[in-house]
Image: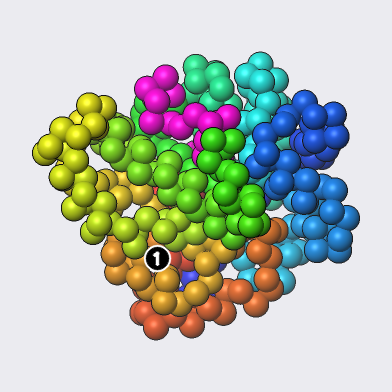
Amino acid sequence: MAAYQRIATEEAYAPTDLIERYRRAIRDGTVDDPGFRSLMGYFLFNDSPRTNAIVERLQDVGERRIADMDASGIAKQIVSLTAPGVQIFDAATAAALTVDYNEQLAEAVARRPDRLAALAAIAPQDPAHAAAELERAVTRLGMKGAIVNSHTQGEYLDDPKFWQIFEAAEALGVPVYIHPQTPPRAMIQPFLDCGLDGAIFGFAVETGLHMLRLIVSGVFDRFPRLKIVVGHLGEGIPYWLFRVDFFHQGIVQTGRYEKVRPLKKKPSDYMRENFYVTTSGMAWEPAILYARQVLGADRVLYAMDYPYQYIVEEVAVTDNLPIGDEEKKALYQTNAERVFGL
Ligand code: 1DF
Ligand code: MN
């Protein structure tokens, strides 16, 4: 018996219905977002063994997924709707789909509650519906929080019109996982020009921006107990905290931007008190150790990013970290149990 259970916290799935909607949206041009077309054009029209295997795995929340978990040493997955989720659709369609998809995902989890847990899909396009659906998913379907795939058609959650989502999450005591997606139209061209718009870099730039927008907008002064989870060891932001603190102070003191108001704490304080980061797609010892050093060992959680980075031997990196057994158990298991209320 291993001394810990490996709980993977950023694990994607896609209902076949969503895959078909994505295919139609690209083919018919009904969604003309350049990032979406780049990302899902690749996965759904590339027809290579690599992309086909990922798309097949995305659609299984049953035996095949469990077998892959067995093969790679994962005790439990926290499953969530793949990026960009429903956020590219119109508000009414998106809201209706979240209800459907959450019901179906809850049924899949109910078949294997020993191996699976889930985050709720929500549609930020309709903030009131999103807040209500989060509450329904947590209280009635047993889900452990919400996933938001970063910007919604170019809009970010620091806009107060979205804050009822945070109000609901804080009241329920569940986290919001802010997962990357491709940069929005206003930002993407220089990334697209050289193939850097996706998970290779554009995802992190876009989601890192989202994190900082939440911090400087004062979301965490308004919702001090709000928990945000981000992947990829914090999307680069832990490396930037010293510099963000320094320049934020200057901006606020001089009144350089009318919209940038003073905060109760330093930006880095919110990163350490309101955020958790996961190791999704970052099975790399120096980066994991750095994140733990800067944020604290109780703020870093394991994730694989299945099926996008399904690598059977990946957990060896985490198994072999030069940290104590209790700390390894926190990274793999007890932090996730605490943050997601498993
Ligand atoms: C990719 C990577 C796609 C991640 C994802 O969802 C995703 C990829 C569409 O490889 O293009 O979740 N990821 O989190 O790194
Ligand atoms: Mn991911």
Check the picture and name the quadrant holding the N terminus: bottom right
**Residue 99 forms part of the magenta stretch:** no
Residue 302, percent across and down? 49, 63
Which residue is labeled 1 in the image? 330
**Residue 146 forms part of the magenta stretch:** yes
Q: Is residue 279 visible?
A: yes
Q: Residue at x 40, y 65 (%)?
A: 330
| Location of residue 27 with respect to 13 vertically, above or below | above
Question: Badge 1, how many Cα within 10 Å: few under 14, some, many 20+?
Answer: many
Q: How is the image coloured?
A: rainbow
Q: Is residue 235 left or right of residue 266?
A: right
The residue under label 1 is which amino acid type? Answer: Ala
54 vs 32, nearest the viewer: 32
Q: Residue at x 57, y 49 (%)?
A: 190
151 vs 136, nearest the viewer: 151
Residue 230, percent across and down? 46, 50
Place residue 298 in its image quadrant: bottom left
**Magenta range:** 145-164
15 vs 62, nearest the viewer: 15
Q: Main secondary structure of the magenta part?
A: loop
Q: Is residue 172 visible?
A: no
Q: Residue at x 43, y 66 (%)?
A: 331
252 vs 105, nearest the viewer: 252
Place residue 293 in its image quadrant: bottom left
Q: Is residue 230 left or right of residue 190?
A: left
Residue 269, percent across and down? 22, 49
